[in-house]
Image (cartoon, rainbow, N blue to C red):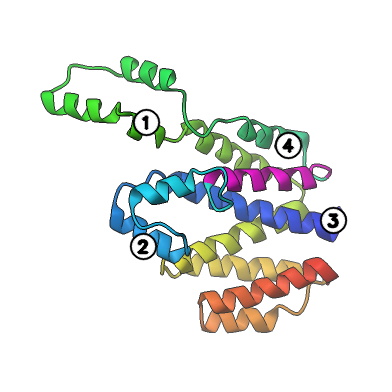
Amino acid sequence: MILVLSTAQSLYWLGRIAVRIDNLCHLLPFEDDEAARSYAHAFALPAWSADTLNQLLLDPDQTVSLPGNLQHLFENVQQVRGVILEQTYQAFNALQQTDIEPDPASIDRQRSANQTVSSPAEDLISAQAEAPRELSLQLNPDIRLRLAQCMDVMREEDDRVQLFWKLGQIIESVDIALRVQSTPLTAIQGLADILDELEALGWRGLDAAFHYFQQRPGLTGLYQLCDLLDELFEDGP
């Protein structure tokens, strides 16, 4: 398969945004103010508590939010529709149709189905869970399920499609880990393997930047590598 540069770049961003969305789905809603402040600081977000961070990350008008990233994801899906399988497109389309917040009636039905004899303490917890504020912060579990289905069907794609998708996934995973002050050794090794595959395709000029990053794993080195990748996407290998 021959991929034009713009399509390869869209696959790369598709991978990055998918990891970003998955990360948000695992974290939302924040409940601890200190954890929220730490996350907001790591990602330079204007939030100072769990409430303000949750509001920001669920605001469709914010590009960094879950709805904002979902919109960015769908835009890139349209850009790569000509090279992905129909089943892959349909999986992403199903994700697009998913409401972020679950239907309150469906939550009530699920609670009724799971209802057992409860203690007074459990009754209190249940009453708190039914408060409108708490309900508004719950994510539809279908989002994570359908995102996982998208991840699965991407494994059936052509090797070239998977290569740039995986490149984006690993870059984003490394970025997130470094921001929260974790050392992503496994991801860095995976990135080395993918860069070897890119070099075999003629994508040269990344060795020095990656070597610098390996010696000094930090955001500065990662962004230097990303800048070089952007140049290759724009100008070609």
Q: Measure the alpha-carbon separation of dots 3 and 4.
A: 17 Å
Cα gap from disc 4 to disc 2, whole angstroms: 36 Å
Q: CA distance from mark 1 to mark 2?
A: 24 Å
Quarter holding the C terminus is bottom right
21 vs 15, left or right, is left
User: Relative to the observer, which residue lies in front, 179 or 209?
Assistant: 179
Name the mark nearer the viewer: 4 or 2.
2
Identify the residue under disc 4: 89
Q: Residue at x 56, y 69 (%)?
A: 189
Q: Earlier in the sequence, mark 4 or mark 2?
A: 2
**Closer to us: 3 or 56:** 56
In space, the residues marked 3 and 1 are separated at their CA atoms by 44 Å
Whether pointer 1 and pointer 2 mark residues with C-beta atoms closer than 8 Å, the reply is no
Residue that numbered label 1 is attached to? 135
Is residue 68 inside the magenta stretch?
Answer: yes
Task: Of the two numbered discs 3 and 1 on the same chain, state the one appearing first in sequence.
Answer: 3
Of badges 4 and 1, nearer the viewer stands 1
* The magenta segment: 66-82
Q: Secondary structure at mark 2?
A: helix
Tell me, yes or no, if residue 201 can be seen here.
Answer: no
Q: Earlier in the sequence, mark 2 or mark 3?
A: 3
Identify the amino acid type marked 1.
Leu
User: Disc 4 on helix, strand or loop?
Assistant: helix
* Residue 227, x across and y down, in percent: 69, 73
Looking at the image, the residue that sits furthest to the left is: 120
Residue 38's mark?
2
User: For numbered disc 1, what is the local secondary structure?
Assistant: helix
Q: State whether residue 101 is above or below residue 110.
A: below
Pick whichever, 165 or 192, lies toward us. 165
